[in-house]
Amino acid sequence: MPEIIDVCPIEELPPGERRLVEWEDLEIGVFNCGGNLYAIEDRCSHDDGPLAEGEFDEENCTVECPRHGSLFDLTTGKPKTLPAYVPVDTFAVIIEDQTIKLEVE
Ligand code: FES
């Protein structure tokens, strides 16, 4: 069963910003790309690098793994450059009562 967790009030995550949240043993990065919100697991599929803490390019909606530099598309979780080649998990983002929420399972 999916569970809904609160991230933060919508005004606390403006375009160009990100936020990390924890749920059970998962860490998840939530990103605002020009008003659209995306969430990915904060763990690179290549070698477990802290992916969501890397350089965030809002315009292209990508994040660069700080460990070996793979670039990931935040909209799909898919890597665009090597060495990673397996997508990371993505999570549905919901806006309800002016609050950003995630669907996790
Ligand atoms: S751990 Fe992310 S590219 Fe290697």
Image (cartoon, rainbow, N blue to C red):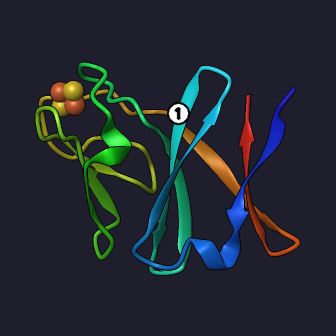
Residue 16, percent across and down? 39, 75
| Count of numbered labels shown in the rendering | 1
Residue 85, percent across and down? 24, 29
Please name the residue shown 31% across and 21% down the image.
48
Q: Specify the quadrant of the image occupied by residue 70.
A: top left
Q: Specify the quadrant of the image occupied by residue 101.
A: bottom right
Residue 4 lies left or right of residue 37; in this view the side is right
Instruction: Name the secondary structure under disc 1.
Output: strand
User: Which image quarter has ligand 1?
Assistant: top left
Mark 1 residue CB less than 8 A from any atom of ligand 1: no
The residue nearer to you, when weighing 63 against 75, is 63
Judging by the rendered image, the residue that carries numbered circle 1 is 27
Q: Quadrant of the N terminus?
A: top right
Amino acid, disc 1: Glu
Please, is residue 21 above or below residue 6 in the view? above
Please, is residue 43 above or below residue 94 in the view? above
Q: Quadrant of the C terminus?
A: top right
Residue 36 lies left or right of residue 61; in this view the side is right
Residue 75 lies left or right of residue 99; in this view the side is left
Q: Is residue 88 visible?
A: yes
Please, is residue 104 above or below residue 76 in the view? above
Please name the residue shown 30% across and 58% down the image.
62
Residue 83, percent across and down? 12, 29
Please name the residue shown 82% across and 43% down the image.
4
Please name the residue shown 50% across and 33% down the image.
89
